[in-house]
Image: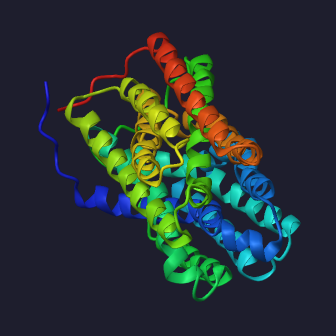
Amino acid sequence: MTAAAAPISETDRSSLAVTLAVTVVASMPVFLTGALGVEVRRDLGVSVTELGAAVSACFGISGLASNFAGRLSRQLGPRQTLRVSTLVTGSSMLGLATVGRSFPALVVCLGICGIGHSLTQPAVNALLIRRVAIRRLGLAFGVRQSAIPVVVLLSGISVPALALTIGWRAVFGVAAAFAVGTSIFAGTLDETARPGATIQRSGTLATRRNLVVLGVAGGLGAMAGNALAVFLVSAAAHAGIGQGAAGLLLAVASLTAVLARIVMGDLADRRQAEGLGIVAILLAVGSLGFLGLTSSVPALFVVASLLAFAAGWGWPGLFSFAIVIRHPHAPEVATATTQSGMYLGAACGPVIFGALATLSYGVAWTVMASALLAAALITLAARSALAPPPARPA
């Protein structure tokens, strides 16, 4: 039965504003690099494969640092962790704007971004479960995760609006300044648990094996999603769409992912859903969109892009939500476990896609579609082995 959704309170809104800002900062370096890939490759003299490898360095380091970052976030608390993470990420973008003038420098700067990214995720998850009422937690995670496709949207807009006029380095300079401002904003955060939030500090991770399995599923989904966000502009250009139009397509398609993440989170709250079943459906439907990207007909490519982003990249908010509501006693550690798999998958996606794209974009998209379908099946298998989450108040 569908329940009436409770409004988002003032406390919830202030916490969401902080989480949105820091998530935007954490995602900026890699997705700006992907959207500005044509200019970056031309200026630095790197290939598509090398660009994918540089982006993968960010997520590879995030994956390796994820468990440590979860423990550190638990010790420092969300406010201090988020202040540090945004400054680290800002330094990586400042490096890209100034000293990033070779392929090794590009890898180093994006690797530094990976450290900031790994710190952001567990701190944000812990903040939401402390500050947001559990009956609205699905929407909160959907809104928070919508920040990532928002970055992709802004990255797409930056191609015709900024990169083709003031240059790609200036875009990273502006982004670095935004990161500093966000770090100051995070310092105003109230991280104490609010009445009605579900924060408990007892219990154990009784489903660690299932968390690892879900991490594999998330990794396969992230592999495809990251490849989509990083290479859509290049693939669209290959399909006969102009560079400026390809950037706008990335922006519009990202907007569908934003809407999907928010709507699916709100739906989970209204229907008291546990999340993973909807995640599996989105992954399966998204694989069809990825298959559509094999088309060289521009109109079909555009439609497939919208479906791929909406479904194939609309699931991460619900995924994190499903993990957190099952482990309210240790959200940092639980999500760090699954996030490790997602980071490693995100690291593999661009480099695998870049290597396959040198042979054929059609082959590359087909492999990513297969990864999404496998992720859907693994998610269903893990869901059947997990205990249902505790009931949430209407």
The image quarter in which residue 15 lies: bottom left
Q: In this view, does 45 lie above or below 234?
A: below
- The residue at 79%/67% (across/down) is 106
- Looking at this view, name the residue that lies furthest to the top: 385
Task: Give the image quarter of residue 221.
Answer: top right
Nearest the viewer among 370 and 315 is 370
In this image, 315 relative to 34: left or right?
A: left
Vertical side of 355 occupied by 164: above or below = below
- How far across and how far down the image is residue 204, in percent? 55, 23
Name above or below for residue 216 compared with residue 134. Answer: above
Q: Where is residue 280 in the image (x, y as percent from the top left)?
A: 43, 26
Image quadrant assignment for residue 34: bottom right
Quarter of the picture containing the C terminus is: top left
Compared with 331, 118 (above or below) is: below
Residue that appears at 77% across and 45% down = 355
Give the residue displayed 52% in from the left and 43% down from the top: 295
Residue 298 location (% of width, % of height)? 47, 54
**Residue 391 location in percent, x, y?**
28, 23
Figure quadrant of the N terminus:
top left
Colour scheme of this structure image?
A: rainbow
Asked whether residue 233 appears in the rendered view, the answer is yes
Count of picture labels = 0
Residue 135 located left or right of residue 319: left
Left or right: residue 162 compared with residue 39: left
**Residue 186 in sight here:** no
Residue 392 or residue 117, whichever sits in front: 117
